[in-house]
Image (spheres, rainbow, N blue to C red):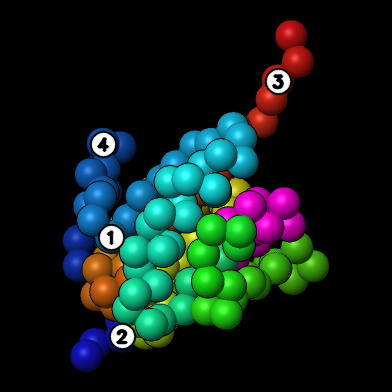
Amino acid sequence: MNNSIALKNSNLNTNIKLNQTWFNIKHVDNEQFFSSDLAKVCAKNQKQKRWILCVDGDESSLQTLAENVDTSKILRVNGQRQPIAFDKIARALLKGNCSTVILCDHDFSERQLMMLQSCARQGNTECIVVNKKQNQLH
């Protein structure tokens, strides 16, 4: 297996099409996403007996998720003090030890999103980027 994270075609356009099977970007504004949609995905994927990796998820979101899935296979990585390097995330996707990788509140470039999609597909790992919408005061 080739563990390279380089894109085959580096000519990116602004209308990128992401494969929804391996890679999703979700914009959420409440904890219901963690207790319903994300919990269903994780429960389905846990049948594979592989890890669920959550990078930079806040405590309340993870608690909501933990109420609905087997917590013995959830790994939490917190990069608030030391940011998690992009290449480490890509390698985790490539290795295939996780059934699901959840990336919370990360600001990825278009190129990085394409690389994550490719790594997820190659590693047979579902990758979900969760961006919480900030409530704006008017």
Report which residue position mark 3 lands on: 136
Q: CA distance from mark 1 to mark 4?
A: 18 Å
Q: Look at label 4 and name its amino acid.
A: Asn
Residue topped by disc 1: 22
Q: Are marks 2 and 1 in contact (CB under 8 Å)?
A: no
Instruction: Identify residue type, mark 1.
Output: Trp
Between discs 4 and 2, the one toward the N terminus: 2
Looking at marks 1 and 4 on the same chain, the residue that comes earlier in the sequence is marked by 4
Disc 4 secondary structure class: loop
In the image, residue 125 above or below residue 62: below
First in sequence: mark 2 vs mark 3: 2
Q: Of the residues tagged 1 and 4, which is closer to the observer? A: 1
First reached walking from the N terminus: tag 4 or tag 3: 4
Bin the neighbour count of mark 3 within 10 Å (Cα to Cα): few under 14, some 14-19, many 20 and up. Answer: few
Q: CA distance from mark 1 to mark 3?
A: 31 Å
Instruction: Locate the N terminus by quadrant.
Output: bottom left
Q: Say few, some or many: other residues with alpha carbon within 10 Å of mark 4 (under 14 / 14 to 19 / 20 or more).
A: few
Q: Is any part of residue 58 visible from this angle?
A: no
Residue 137 vs 115, above or below: the answer is: above
Q: x%, y% of residue 73?
A: 52, 79
Reading the image, the residue beneath label 4 is 15
Find the magenta span and give its range. Answer: 55-65
What residue is rendered at 20% in x and 61% in y?
9
On-image quarter of the C terminus: top right
In this view, the residue in front, 40 or 137, is 40
Q: Is residue 28 left or right of residue 13?
A: right
| Residue at the spot of label 2 | 3
